[in-house]
Amino acid sequence: MFHSLPINQDSMKFITYTLIPALAFFINLHAASSKEDAADPSKVDADYAIQGEYTGTVKGEEGDKKLGCQVVALGDGQFTSRGFVGGLPGDGWNLNKEEMVKGSKAADGSVTFANDKHKGIIRDGVMTVETLDGKKIGELKRVVRKSPTLGAKPPKGAVVLFDGKKHGADLWKGGRQTEDGLLMQGCTSKQTFSDFKIHIEFRTPYKPKARGQGRGNSGFYAHGRYEVQVLDSFGLEGRHNECGGIYSTKAPLLNMCYPPLTWQTYDVDFTAAKFRDGKKTANAIMTVHHNGVLIHDKTVCDHATTASPMREGPEPGPVFFQNHGNPVRYRNVWVEKK
């Protein structure tokens, strides 16, 4: 039996003004810490070593064939995988869409994916591909790709907006910098631009149990008006609201999103909309390379993104990195004026 304890006025004051605020503080501190942990490569779970890209060759009816596979962690030992005939996206894929297959981690740490013809078994960074009766027909090894423009140095005359050193968060409204010299999401450049080219390096967090727009969401807004989505869309189809998409305007030609916690690049050529006497005479245009691969070729942006902080207009605009409650990190951001 439980007995109620007498609570006097002093006890109520202690509970109300001391105990409850203290508990709330520690709960919020834990939640904030957990959120930031998603951005820390040293604090991943065991599934992270399984998630990633795999590539190799398999034997088919017409001989050896190159095959790529993307494996996505969903939390608690659950995964999905998607195969790419010809190689990974941007590395030979024939553009034929393949089905996603679910897999679960076994007691020995292996993960098996199977469809109606084949199965793939991951052990120690290698996916062995077999027929359903157990005959080995190929092997794919886990790879970590690197964008060819990663670490690109700003050319002479470029405006460096962030390098974590001489050019820091003080160049941004709402700018915050991590202890290891990275720019946090949710900031707007103090400097504005008309037509420009920009180089951006970004890293999405590892949030295996999150889904959709809650999985590493941010965004780069040219002029504070037109958004190129930043999101952990690794292994997805590549829609307008996924990584590389010009939000509400056009899906990328190819989903070039790397796994979370991998540094990625956007290289964008932006031409601003033109106005005369308060009326728009030409739409904005963007060409975008994601991890070195063309995903938008002179795409017309006929309207500002719904959530943009600025409406369309003739004024030059800033670079804006959206805060969507996810710890996305940026570095090596520089602009060339056109």
Image: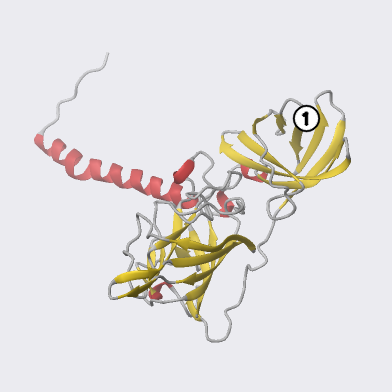
What sort of colour scheme is used for the picture?
A: secondary structure
Q: Nearer the viewer, residue 86 or 2?
A: 86
Compared to 271, does 11 lie above or below? above
Look at label 1 and name its amino acid: His
Q: Position of residue 180 (x, y in %)?
A: 51, 66
Query: What residue would you read off at disc 1?
Result: 118
Residue at 39% from the left image edge and 45% from the top image edge: 31
Q: Position of residue 207 (x, y in %)?
A: 51, 45
- Corner quadrant of residue 156: bottom right
Residue 80 horizontal side relative to residue 245, left or right: right
Q: Position of residue 182 (x, y in %)?
A: 49, 66
Q: Position of residue 267 (x, y in %)?
A: 56, 68
Residue 292 horizontal side relative to residue 173, left or right: right
- Corner quadrant of residue 303: bottom left
Within 10 Å of disc 1 (Cα), the crowding (few <14, some 14-19, many 20+) is some
Q: Nearer the viewer, residue 235 or 303?
A: 303
On the question of residue 322 being in view, the answer is yes
Give the tally of numbered discs.
1
On the question of residue 180 being in view, the answer is no
Q: Residue furthest left?
A: 9
Residue at 18% from the left image edge and 44% from the top image edge: 17
Compared to 158, does 93 lie above or below? above
Could you tell me which quadrant the N terminus lies in? top left
Q: Residue furthest right?
A: 63
Q: Nearer the viewer, residue 184 or 290?
A: 290
Residue 290 horizontal side relative to residue 126, left or right: left
Q: Secondary structure at mark 1?
A: strand
Compared to 132, does 148 lie above or below? below
Compared to 220, does 31 lie above or below? above
- Corner quadrant of residue 146: bottom right
Q: Residue furthest bottom?
A: 157
